[in-house]
Image (cartoon, rainbow, N blue to C red):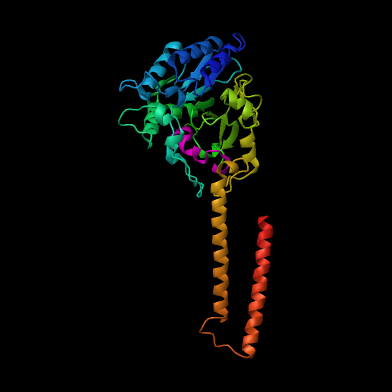
Amino acid sequence: MACLTCREWVQGLSTSAHLQDVAIIAGDITDKLEILEETMQLLVDRFAHVFFTPGNHDLWCRGTARSASENSLGKLAQILSMCARLGVHTGPYRIPASGSQRACWIVPMLSWYHASFDDEPDIEYLQLPPVEHVVRDFSSCTWPEHLKLHDDGVAQHLDLMNEHMDAMTSEGLMSGDELYEFIQNSGEAVVSFSHFLPRVELLPEKRYLFFPNLAKVVGSNMLRSRVERLKPDVHLFGHTHFGWDQTLDGIRYIQAALAYPRERKARKLSLTIGTAPEELQCIYNSSDGGHFADQLSAQWSDFYQTNKRDPLNMELASWVRPQYQAQVEKWEQSRASRQAWSRSSSEEHSLHVLGIGGSDSRSSGSGDALLSKTRAHQLNVRAQLASTSSLVAR
C-alpha cells in the first residue's frame, strides 16, 4: 500500500474510541523509517497497546541503506529499537484482566520465507520466471554475507531471534520454550501473529494464482513449528492479501489485510473478511470471561470449507488460463498426443495377445472367424469405454 495512504488511514481512526483496545499490526507499513515512526506514534496515541512485527516491505533497503552496516538485518534492529522507544510491543506480552475479564497473551513472531516451504507440486507445463526475477525483495533487501535469500538462512536467523524475546511472568522473566509452556498452562487467551504464513494451506492452490509459484515466497516451516509449539487460540498473519479465517489442527488462522488501495478496488471480493477490508476487525473481547469473534466470512477460506484441497490438479482456473494461453494449449496438445499413443499402443497389445496380425499368427478357417468376432467384440467394448470416458470428462 502507498505509504501516505497507510498513514492517512491511521490518522482517520478515532482518537478516543480505541483507548481501551489493543492493535495488532502484522507488518508492511512502509520501507521509510521516518514514516514508520510517524505511523507507529499515531497508533500509540489511539490504542492502549500496539503490537508490531515487521514485514518484507519494512525491511527494504533502498537508496541510502546499501552499505555493509546498513542492511536489512541492521534495519530490523533499528525498527525494534524504535518500537521499544515508542512503547510498541515486538515481543510476547500479557494484557492483564480485571473483574470478569479474561487476560490475554499476545505473541509476535519474527519470520521470513523460504522456497522449501512450498511442498506442493509445481504446474508441470508452465515455464515461469524464477521468483528472484519477480519478487522485489531479492533486489530491495540486502543481508550480511552469511545470510542468503536463496536458501533458508534468513528464515532460520529471524526465527531464532524469537528465542531471545523474553516476557515478564508471575514466575519471573522467561523466554523460548519455557515461556511458551508457561503461556500454554496459564489458562488465559493466547493470540500469536506473524507477517508470513505458517502453513501452505493458508494460500490458494497454484492453479488459482496468477503467479503459481507464489508459495515459494510466502511462508516458513520454522514459523509453523513455532506456532504449533505455542498452540495459540488464534494466529494472525499477513503478506498475501487474501481474507482468511480457517481452523487447522485446532488453531484458528486469520488474515485481515488492509492491502494496497488499488487492491481494495480490484480485488475486494477475495480481500474482504467479515466487513469491508478498511475496517478494524475485533478478534478477541476480554469482557464477560473473554470470547473470540465468531467465524468471519472470507472468499477463499469459505471455499476450502466445502472443497478439498487438490494440489495435484494442474488445470488452471478460468481467470488464470488466459495469462498462460499459449503454454496451456501446447500442454493440452501434448497430453492429447500422449493419450492417443497410449490408446493405440494398448489396442495393438490386445490384438497381438489374441493372435490377430503379426507373422506368428497360425489361426485359419473357423478359428479365424472366431478370432475375428472376438476382435470385433473387444473393439466395440473399447469404443464404448472411450465414449463413456469422454462423457465423464465433459
Q: Is residue 249 visible?
A: no
Q: From the top left corner, tell me how far across and down residue 119 is, in percent.
A: 47, 44
View extreme (bottom): residue: 365
Residue found 60% across the figure and 30% down from its top: 243
The quadrant holding residue 202 is top right
> As drawn, is 175 to the left or to the right of 27?
left
Identify the main secondary structure in magenta. Answer: helix
> As drawn, is 34 to the left or to the right of 285?
left
- Quarter of the rendering occupied by the C terminus: bottom right
Residue found 50% across the figure and 14% down from its top: 39
Placement of 184 over or under 363, stated as above or below: above
Q: From the top left corner, tell me how far across and down residue 178 is, in percent.
A: 41, 28
View extreme (front): residue: 326
> As drawn, is 305 to the left or to the right of 42?
right
Placement of 323 over or under 258, stated as above or below: below
- Quarter of the rendering occupied by the N terminus: top right
Most foreground residue, 96 or 206? 206
Q: Is residue 227 visible?
A: yes
Most foreground residue, 184 or 360? 360
The quadrant holding residue 84 is top left
Q: From the top left corner, tell me how far across and down residue 23 is, in percent.
A: 55, 18
Residue 294 inside the magenta-drawn segment: no
Residue found 62% across the figure and 40% down from its top: 319
Residue 228 inside the magenta-drawn segment: yes
Q: From the top left corner, tell me how far across and down residue 181 is, in percent.
A: 45, 30
Range of residues picked out in magenta: 206-229
